[in-house]
Amino acid sequence: MIIGLPKEIKNHEYRVGLTPTGVRELTTRGHRVLVERGAGAGVGLDDTAYEAAGAQLVESAETVFGKAEMVVKVKEPQPNECALLRPGQILFTYLHLAPDPEQTRLLVDSDAIAIAYETVTDAHGGLPLLAPMSEVAGRMAVQAGAHALEKAQGGRGVLLGGVPGVTPANVAIIGGGVVGVNAARMALGLGADVTVLDRDLDRLKALDAQYGPHLKTLYSTTDTLEATVFAADLVIGAVLIPGAAAPKLVTRAMLSRMRPGAVVVDVAIDQGGCFETSRPTTHQEPIYVVDGVVHYCVANMPGGVARTATFALTNATLPYVLALADKGYRQALHDDPHLRAGLNVHRGAVTHPAVARDLGYAYRPASDALAA
Ligand SMILES: NC(=O)C1=CN([C@@H]2O[C@H](COP(=O)(O)OP(=O)(O)OC[C@H]3O[C@@H](n4cnc5c(N)ncnc54)[C@H](O)[C@@H]3O)[C@@H](O)[C@H]2O)C=CC1
Ligand SMILES: CC(=O)C(=O)O
Ligand SMILES: [Mg+2]
């Protein structure tokens, strides 16, 4: 198969879809890999390393999209990338379609086959291709929140860990999944007073067993959410309903009752965000203030630590890239129901139930689409 690796073009996005190590796994199996010149330069993965791994360097994204049978990326395709997709071409990347009707329309119209990293599942109920970036974003959320709490950023001037004689900050984490647990780990490590809310009791039990009495866990209801958010210095939004738009758990009315200068880091922004007042921001302008509350809503947080994130992403995606390349997408998706769960758009049909429901498309089960 011909696999294409374009340079990412989203604001301050330096990750790249495969490392040279990943490329080598493909070329040694007889696949051809086209890499856009400079694709990995931002993370110190030079063109020469891709060439040494057997890739062919090409000058433009147009050539990558024009020749590749499968395009491997990191972020959702931007409108000008969607315009380059060809009928029957495989696109393997993060998509986050539910909050993004424009991209969904462009993918449906492209007649391509779009497989989303974030809805690929595993046998343990996890999301193995979202998890590595959720680990990164969860850990970063605490760094971002700590910075935003500084006065110069509009924050209330609170140090997460406090100091001897002064209480630490209150950190509330809504959603105790992969982002939540990684955020909790960092916030606890800095000495903050941390509470995790989730509506899945088994998650809370697992967190309690892992962190013991240092971590407070709370079953998430309107009452517990309000009480925790109103008392917090930093609130991290980390909920997910796979494939679906995030529920707006913190309303504008609730926001107005938060502490002045408190900070919200809405990691769930890539699925639309769980604060009513969230809107996507970029690494260039990551924060804005509503009702005195500082919002950090960067939709590609791991792009900020792109080198760590690129290696973590390739570690997770590589087996699936190899399966798609070796078997072709039909056989690979037929053989692996968990990879099949990643199929969001197939040749003009929306094949993920939550995306179809949230955006008002007819839902075509992936198995039907593949059988046709
Ligand atoms: N902004 C960024 O750069 C990045 C964003 N993300 C996003 O972060 C979000 C969280 O991802 P993960 O932690 O991997 O998901 P996960 O599935 O591991 O965890 C989500 C948790 O939210 C809980 N939850 C769902 N509805 C809830 C509610 N109403 N109240 C309380 N808890 C609720 C679930 O029970 C689950 O434990 C996703 O939207 C993901 O796409 C992930 C990586 C990077
Ligand atoms: C998951 C995601 O949105 C990211 O890594 O940018
Ligand atoms: Mg988008």
Image: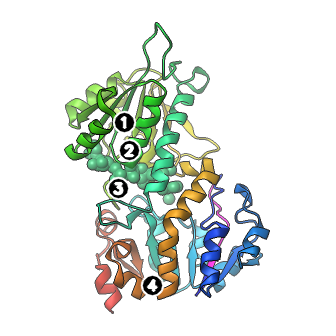
Distance, label 2 to label 3, CA atoms, is 13 Å
Q: Which of labels 3 and 1 is toward the front? A: 1
Answer above or below: position of 255 versus 50.
above
- Magenta stretch: give its range: 4-11
Q: As shown in the figure, which amino acid type bears the numbered disc 1?
A: Ile
Q: Looking at mark 2, is its residue's CB closer than 8 Å to ligand 1?
A: yes
Sequence-earlier tag: 2 or 3: 2
Residue 43 drawn at (x, y percent)? 70, 56
Sequence-earlier tag: 2 or 1: 1
Residue identifier under label 1:
173
Q: As shown in the figure, which amino acid type bears the numbered disc 3?
A: Ala
Distance, label 3 to label 1, CA atoms, is 19 Å
Q: Are marks 2 and 1 in contact (CB under 8 Å)?
A: yes
For the question of whether residue 204 can be seen, the reply is yes
Answer above or below: position of 345 versus 133.
below
Distance, label 2 to label 4, CA atoms, is 32 Å
Distance, label 4 to label 3, CA atoms, is 27 Å
Residue identifier under label 3:
245
